[in-house]
Every structure is written in structure tokens, then in C-alpha cells.
Amino acid sequence: MNRFFRNIQFRPVIIVFASLCLMLIAIRLHEHFNGKMNEFKSRNGLQQLLILKKSQLEKSLYSRIFYTRSIAAYVSMNPGITVGSFNRMAREFAENDSVISSMSLSENCIISAIYPLKGHEGAMGLNLLEHARRRKIVEETIKTGKTFVAGPVELVEGGIAFISYTPIFTGGENDKPRFWGVTDIVISRDKLFSEAKIGKHDTDFIYGLKGYDGQGAQGGFFWGDPTVFERNPETVEISLPTGSWILAAAPVIGWPDYIRKSENPSYILYFMAFIICILIWVFLNAQAKLRANEREMNETRDKIFSIIAHDLRSPFTAFLGFTEIMSEEILDMNRKEVQEIARSMRKSATSLFHMLEDLLEWSQMQRGLITFNPALLRLKPLVDECIGNVSETARFKELKIINNTAEGLDVWADNIMLQTIIRNILSNAVKFTPAGGTVTVSAVPAAGNTVEIAVNDTGIGMSKAVLDDLFGMNLNSRRKGTEGEPSTGLGLIICKEFVERHKGMIHAASEEGKGSTFYIILPQAPGR
């Protein structure tokens, strides 16, 4: 007696508790893995954004630097250039360009021409080699023969700008190049960044730049939010003709909060875990009670639970197996593998749910708890609703479901029972039709004031042995679907009983490898 009590009372508790623990562990591992994936995805997304901003900034900057190179090339071939000629060239470049503050020409490093002259008269005759802030850059420009971008610097006339210096050398192919001077362009910092659509912050991120005078990571911070480089930012290098800047960005709210905000809520998984445990508890307790009253069961009930014991084991074992894999190997899996495991877990859980749903419906039917309330129903929208119930599974298998039900056709039936009938037949059609197949529902008026509903599929079909026991309880005739979906056969038994409650008929025609068609005959009006 004690042994019996232990088996009945404590065994379900242990199994449910163990299942719950495994699922909770799997969910926690999923959360950890999901957090890592979200961080990777968030950082990758920010990196892509920075690359776009880098491209925009370099485009805006180099389009102006090329102006000085054009002038340098012209002067190297025309060293006797006049102020008027320079002004005409500079006007073409800078007249309608709000980013350019000024352009100048400095023969022997002494400024001899400036465009526009107005507002810059004080700079005429300035020796760049004697200017404390400009001397080092100019000397480096002369020494290397390369273009340099200096700054940002405060302008005498107001504002902050970058100054790009390009050296000018003259001499032919056989002559030793002779240093002629430099040409420079003053580029407004704020207008340059505005054109490149780079701000100090936006809704999600703050930005900053360092690399004063093109010194890259070693240079000083010069623009944006000064705290950004302390927030573990994502960075990109802005390439200059000589040297670089470093553009950095980080979330306004910090990485931990930003990643949590982008995570998918796990409460759905916890909810599903508890629901599955409740279903397991219900099933195990029902199974235990039925075993305790085994001698009182009739032959039908014995067969029903033989079917359940046979078909429920596979998805339940698969589900536990997947949770074990996730608990032990999730850290070594990539995102695609985790998604595949999650899909398989969902598939197993769905199979369990549908089996328990069939069992509950069959049990209610046997006890007379399902009432029969027929009414005149419009058939086509009811079929559309049933198709919607199986559309997700059909979409996963890439199946096409067609509703060819005649418009305006009515049927005299119980709404809930008729939906159960059509939904079960459709579910079977989807289950036994390979990927890429078609399921077609049609309905037309038939003889004797009836309606004939036909559900045709391009599936694997049935042998004569399966067809003969289609609405029976022969355990050996149960088959798995094309994707390994289990089948208790209860759905068709329920369909047959519901159809007979309507004083209708149901039968099937099929051939192996050539699909199946289920025919349902129901009254079209009351009184049949």
C-alpha cells in the first residue's frame, strides 16, 4: 500500500519538478546567450552606423581638400600665377560652398593671395613659418610633400575651423623639384559636421572625436561628448591625407541598460514552461488515476491510452532531450543552432498540446459534456477561419492552402463541432503533405439537400490497410507526418462522431504517393 501511494502521489511531483528545473535552467542559459548575442548585434549595428558617418565625413572633407590639390597642380605648372588668376579659381571652388571659410596662396610660405579678401585683410603678408601655431604643420608639409589637416583652431574672425595645407613644387622631369610655397583651405568645423550629418548626440547614442592635428588615438579630444571615450565605445578611424581622427560612439544610457532594452522578454518562456508543467502534471495524474482503476476500464479506454502512451512519448522525450542539449551545450552553439533547437522545442510542445487537446475533447464527448447546437452557417468564412488555425504550420512547411468553397453556401451545423471537424482534417492534410505541396478545400451543394465538403491534399497518401482502419483505434495503423509529426488518430475519431451527430457521413479516398481526399456530407437545412 505504501509503495502504491508513493508511486501515485510522488512520482508526478518528481517528474514535474525535474522538468520545471530543466526548463528554467534552459531559459536562464538562453537569457545569458541572448544577452551576448544582443550585445554583439547592438555593437555591430553601431559599428555600421559609424562606418556610414565616417564615409559621409570623409566625402565632405576630401571634396574640399581636392580643391587645394587642384590649385597646387595648377601653380606647379604656372608658377607665375597672378592674384587675379588665383581669385578666379578660388571663386569657382568656394563661392557657393558654405563649408569653406577661405582659401589662400602662400609663395615661400608668405600669404600673397586670399579669397575672399574681405574680412581676411589682416592675414595678407603673414609668414606661416613665423606663426607659432602653423609653423610645425607647414614644416611637416614641406618636408613630406603631403597634404596635412591641422586643427581644429579658433579663427581670428570667429568660429572654429580645420586648415588643410598642400605644398607646391615646381620643376620639370629633369629638374630637381623646387619648393614654391603652399596653398591652404579653411574649413568650418561645425558646417562640415552638419553637412556630414554628424551631431554630438541623437536619440540613442553620444559621439566624440579625438586626434587633434591628425594624431589619431594619440591626439587630444576636440569635439562631441568628452565622456564617450570612457564608456567602452565603438570606434572608427577617419582617414586624413596624413594621419587620422578617431570617431567614437556609445549608448546614452550605457551599454548594460541599452542591451537590456533590446532583449526579447523572457517572461513568455517562463509562462510556457509553467504551462507545459501544468499539462504534464494533468497528464501524469490522469494516467496515474487511470492505472489505479485499470480493471474498471473498458476496451475502448484501454486502446485510447495505448495510443496516448505510444505517441506522447516521442515529442516529450524529444523536448527533454532538447532541454538537456541546451543546458549542457548552449555556450558552444551559434545563434543558428540555438534557433533550430528552439524551433524543435516549440514543435514538440505544440504536438504535446494538440494531443492533450484531442484527449480532453474526446473525454468531454464520451461524458456527454459537449452540447449540440446547430444553426445555419455561412461555410466559406468558417473554412477561412479554420485555414488560419493551421496557416503557421503550413507556412513552415511551405504549403499552399486554397479555399474553393462556393460563395454564399450555407450548412446546417453546430459551429464549434464543424470547426473541429474541418480543422482536424486540415491539420492531417498539412501533417501528411511534404514541403511545397497543396491542400485544397472545396464545398458544393449535393443531392438530398446536403453539402459535400472535400479536403484534398497532394500528400503521401494511404495504403488500403490504413484506409480501412482510418476511423478505428488500431495502434499499428498510426503514422508519423512528413516532418516526423506524431498522430494519435483521436482527431479522426472525434470528426466521425461529430459528423454522425449531424446525421452526416465522412469517408476518404486515397492512394499511396498520390494524396488523399476526405469527403464530409452535412445537411444544408434543418429537418434532414
Image (cartoon, helix red, strand yellow):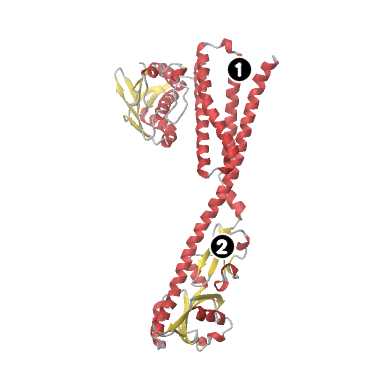
Above or below, 469 relative to 248: above
Asked whether, in this view, residue 361 is left or right of residue 464, the answer is: right
Residue 399 at what x, y percent from top left?
A: 38, 34
Can see residue 163? Answer: yes
Label at residue 319: none
The residue pinned by badge 2 equals 248
Q: Earlier in the sequence, mark 2 or mark 1?
A: 2
Residue 272 at what x, y percent from top left?
A: 57, 34
Question: At 45% from the left edge and 16% from the top edge, which residue is drawn?
Answer: 474
Looking at the rendering, which quadrant does residue 510 occupy?
top left
Q: Give the structural element (helix, strand or loop) at label 2.
A: strand
Front disc: 2 or 1: 2
Which amino acid, mark 2? Ala
Q: Are marks 2 and 1 in contact (CB under 8 Å)?
A: no
Residue 174 at what x, y percent from top left?
A: 39, 84
The residue pinned by badge 1 equals 289
Asked whether, in this view, residue 489 is left or right of residue 253, the answer is: left
Above or below, 302 relative to 186: above
